[in-house]
Amino acid sequence: MVFGVRFEMKRNRTELIVAILSASKKESCKTRIMYDVNMNLASFNKYLRELTRAGLIAKVGNPQNRIVYRITDRGIDLLQLLEKADQFISL
């Protein structure tokens, strides 16, 4: 810790994808997911666009006519695979 500031290593691409997919398990608006994964808007939009195009996250409507996002079955499969890989690597 330097001057009371804690420095953390940057997250890699896989860690960011896992964080976004995990945060998308419950239907949430874009802002809520972004805050949950602690990313800036520009980076988050890039990842969200990629994950949506890949069919890992889907836009869904809700009764209040707001756009919310939810992980898809394909996204759940990938998330489980990445979590297993992380456990295997941690051995």
Image (cartoon, helix red, strand yellow):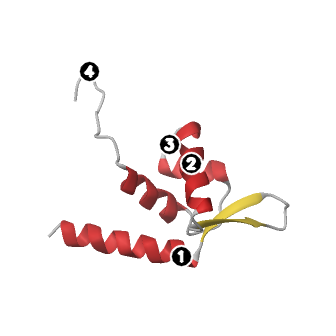
Q: Earlier in the sequence, mark 1 or mark 2?
A: 2
Q: Are marks 4 and 2 in contact (CB under 8 Å)?
A: no
Q: Earlier in the sequence, mark 4 or mark 3?
A: 4
Q: Secondary structure at mark 1?
A: helix
Answer with mark 3 or mark 1, whichever residue precedes in sequence.
3
Q: Nearer the viewer, residue 2 or 68?
A: 68
Locate the N terminus and report the quarter of the image it occupies. top left
Q: What is the C-alpha distance between the residues marked 2 and 3? A: 6 Å
| Badge 3: residue crowd in 10 Å (few <14, some 14–19, many ≥20) | some
Which of the two labelled residues, at mark 2 and mark 3, occupies the earlier sequence position? 2
> Observer-nearest residue: 36 or 69?
69
Q: Which residue appears at 76% of the width and 58% of the height?
A: 67
Q: List x then y, in percent, for residue 17.
A: 45, 57
Which numbered disc covers residue 34? 2
Pointer 1 local density, CA inside 10 Å: few below 14, some 14–19, many at least 20:
few
Inter-mark Cα distance, 1 to 4: 44 Å
> Circle 4 sits on which residue?
3
Q: Which residue is mark 1?
A: 74
Dot 4 alpha-carbon crowd within 10 angstroms: few under 14, some 14 to 19, many 20 or more: few
Rendered image quadrant of residue 27: bottom right
Is label 2 in contact with label 3 (beta carbons under 8 Å)?
yes
- Name the residue at the top extreme: 3
Is residue 77 placed above or below 34 in the rendered structure?
below
Mark with earlier residue (4, 2)? 4
Q: Residue at x 43, y 61 (%)?
A: 18
Q: Amino acid at mark 3?
A: Met
Say what secondary structure mark 2 lies in.
helix
**Which residue is labeled 3 in the image?**
39
- Residue plotted at (68% across, 55% down): 29
- Disc nearest the viewer among 4 and 2: 2
Query: Disc 4 and disc 3: Cα gap in Å?
Result: 24 Å
